[in-house]
């Protein structure tokens, strides 16, 4: 069993739909990252969370430390949101040790 | 512009021919890492560095070497590449490690024949 699990693996949606991607982890963490990888391959950091909730535009990330679970929500989805979304667990603040989920491939159709 | 650069972006080589992939960041970050990404396996950490001359193994270090002689540079060396090292490689940096925002390079696609 992977230490960081994402679901679903693949997700298709119609433009405008509300989308949720889930990430569960089995290790103690100092922070949880959400990354976006576009079809061209580049990876961009969306959020870094250690507690609570963060919002940036139409994207919202939440984390429940007790349940070891994080979610990424996209409101009013758009075709340009089509990408692979990856969560990564940081095991400690003062190392660079990250464990990655295998990603969720999202396709949003017009 | 704050960025992480990698070179080359694409590389085709043959088994056993030593190669180096360069990584440089202009943000004065302490931490730098190398990852490989393979279908179905996701991103896996190869090596990371917490400062100049301080490096440590990640999850898949076999067949790779790194060095951190300057803060801005963190080259990845494949002394004797093999076909199972065909992959997409990413360099990343952060100010103070895993609890900070990660900045990724554009990736290097390597094919070892």
Image (cartoon, coloured by chain):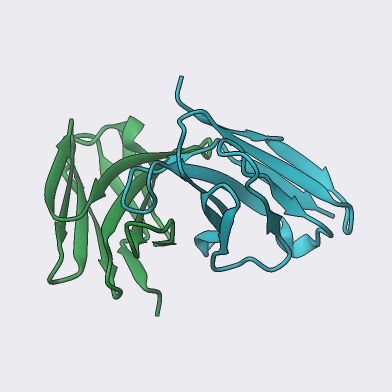
Instruction: Say which quarter of the image contains residue B38.
Output: bottom right
Relative side of B42 to B64, left or right: left
**Can residue B39 be seen at all in this image of the molecule?**
no
Residue at (27% x, 72% y) in the render: A28
Q: Chain B colour? A: cyan
Count every numbered label the image shows and give the total: 0
The x, y position of residue A33, in whole percent, is: 31, 51
Quadrant in which the N terminus of chain A appears: bottom left
Image quarter of the C terminus of chain A: top left
Residue B104 in percent (x, y) is at 48, 40
Query: Which residue is pictured at 35% across the width and 68% down the height?
Result: A4
Left or right of residue B59: residue A9: left
Query: Between residues B83 and B45, which one lies in front from this camera angle?
Result: B45
Locate residue A5: give its quadrant.
bottom left
* Residue found farthest to the top: B1
Task: Indicate left or right for B56 with B94 as reference.
Answer: right
**Identity of the residue drawn at 34% across and 61% down:** A89
């Amino acid at each position: 069993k992977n230490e960081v699990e994402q679901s679903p693996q693949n997700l298709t949606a119609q433009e405008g739909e509300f989308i949720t991607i889930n990430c569960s982890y089995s290790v103690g963490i100092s922070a949880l990252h959400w990354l976006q990888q576009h079809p061209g391959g580049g990876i961009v950091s969306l959020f870094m969370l250690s507690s609570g909730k963060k919002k940036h535009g139409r994207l919202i990330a939440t984390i429940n430390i007790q349940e070891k679970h994080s979610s990424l929500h996209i409101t009013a989805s758009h075709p340009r949101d089509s990408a692979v979304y990856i969560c990564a667990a940081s095991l400690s603040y003062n190392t660079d040790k990250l464990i990655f989920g295998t990603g969720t491939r999202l396709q949003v159709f017009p | 512009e704050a960025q992480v650069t990698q070179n080359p972006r694409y590389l085709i080589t043959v088994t056993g021919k030593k190669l180096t992939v360069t990584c440089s960041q202009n943000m004065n970050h302490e931490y730098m890492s190398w990852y490989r990404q393979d279908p179905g396996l996701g991103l896996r950490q190869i090596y990371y560095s917490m400062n100049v001359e301080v490096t440590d193994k990640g999850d898949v270090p076999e067949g790779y070497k790194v060095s951190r002689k300057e803060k801005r540079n963190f080259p990845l060396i494949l002394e004797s590449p093999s076909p199972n090292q065909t992959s997409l490689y990413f360099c990343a940096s952060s100010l103070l490690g895993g609890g900070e925002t990660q900045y990724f390079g554009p990736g290097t696609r390597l094919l070892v024949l």
